[in-house]
Image (spheres, grey):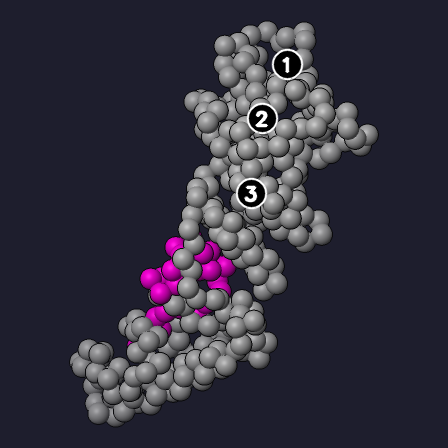
Amino acid sequence: MSELILSCHLGINHQLGYDPPSEPFVFQRVTQAGCPTPAATLSYHIDKVTEIYEGDYTTVYRASLLGQESGAPRDIVLKTDVNARYPRSSMFTQEALRYEKDLRHMQGTYIPNCYGLFQATIYNKLISVLLLEDCGESINFRDRSLSDSDNIQIWKLFTELHVSGFAHRDVDGRNVVKDRDGKFVLVDLEHSRPHKCEVRLRVLIGDFAPRESDFGCEELYDLAIELDFWLPRFLTIYGYQVAVSAFKNGEAKNIVDMLPSDMFGTEEDREEAMREVERVIKCVQEIQAEYADVPDEQRYLRPSDIPKSRFSSEPQAPV
Ligand SMILES: [Zn+2]
């Protein structure tokens, strides 16, 4: 059985109102059914601890891990419920199960390497410590410095998770980290659940957004919106939102008839609106035609000749 020797105490004694102990805390590694048993009995030591997040159930630290099997210390992230108002060891056993069993094949590529779940009963309180590879800093999906290539990498993290039979259930930039080499990794699997992905459409960046019901997967749909992959499903004409589908197949007259008749003072105003709508229909249909020609293997990518901001210089266009 491997053990974790925690000499820095993480304020456990302070939280529970005890004096600092003279001996380090010793945690035992938890091995769950279906997870590989570590080959050797190891003693891990934690050093250089700094807190990076504190929530109701979890505190996250950056630390350095020293283990017998390797000479060099490793940069790790340590998740624990040591400071939790309501410790929930089941959240930790479930997350460890994701790393060590369900999504083990994604470790080191799409999710961090996991160095194990450790538990100890200290002052009558069961405390869990999950050790993970430190893969970098959290991102923000709305960060304008993210390129299309970055966004596609992020997209692949989630699609790989879905293909593996799980949904993340907390789609947010804080749960995607980027390392110094620009590689992205998905973290925080504590809310993940089994998921049968029924996504039916492939994504083209810069195309019009499909309807969620046509797309087939709520989480991936939300992610595509977060990553700003699509043009909107509605265009603004004279201040009114009109579904793109109306422009794809429709006639200008039908669209102008949808607008309140009293907004056109003269027949001339109405004719001008017809010309404006015809121009938007032409633009929408051109985009539609270009995207229809993109072969399946190139989907997920934006054809370089179609600027994302195609409508941006037009006064009646959506932003
Ligand atoms: Zn899915």
Asked whether, in this view, residue 68 is left or right of residue 246, the answer is right
- Left or right: 31 in relation to 84: right
Instruction: Mark 1 vs mark 3: give the one in front.
Output: 3
Secondary structure, mark 3, is loop
Q: Is residue 183 above or below residue 246?
A: above
Residue found at the very far right of the displayed protein: 71
Q: Which segment is the magenta one?
A: 212-239
Question: Upstream in the sequence, badge 1 or badge 3?
Answer: 1
In the picture shown, does residue 268 fall above or below 176? below
Give the SS element for disc 2: loop
Identify the residue under disc 2: 31
- The residue identified by callout 1 is 25
Q: Which mark is residue 103?
A: 3
Residue type indicated by callout 3? Leu
Vertical comparison of 66 with 145: above or below: above
Asked whether residue 226 is drawn in magenta, I would say yes
Q: Which mark is residue 106?
A: none
Where residue 251 appears, x then y in whole percent? 29, 87
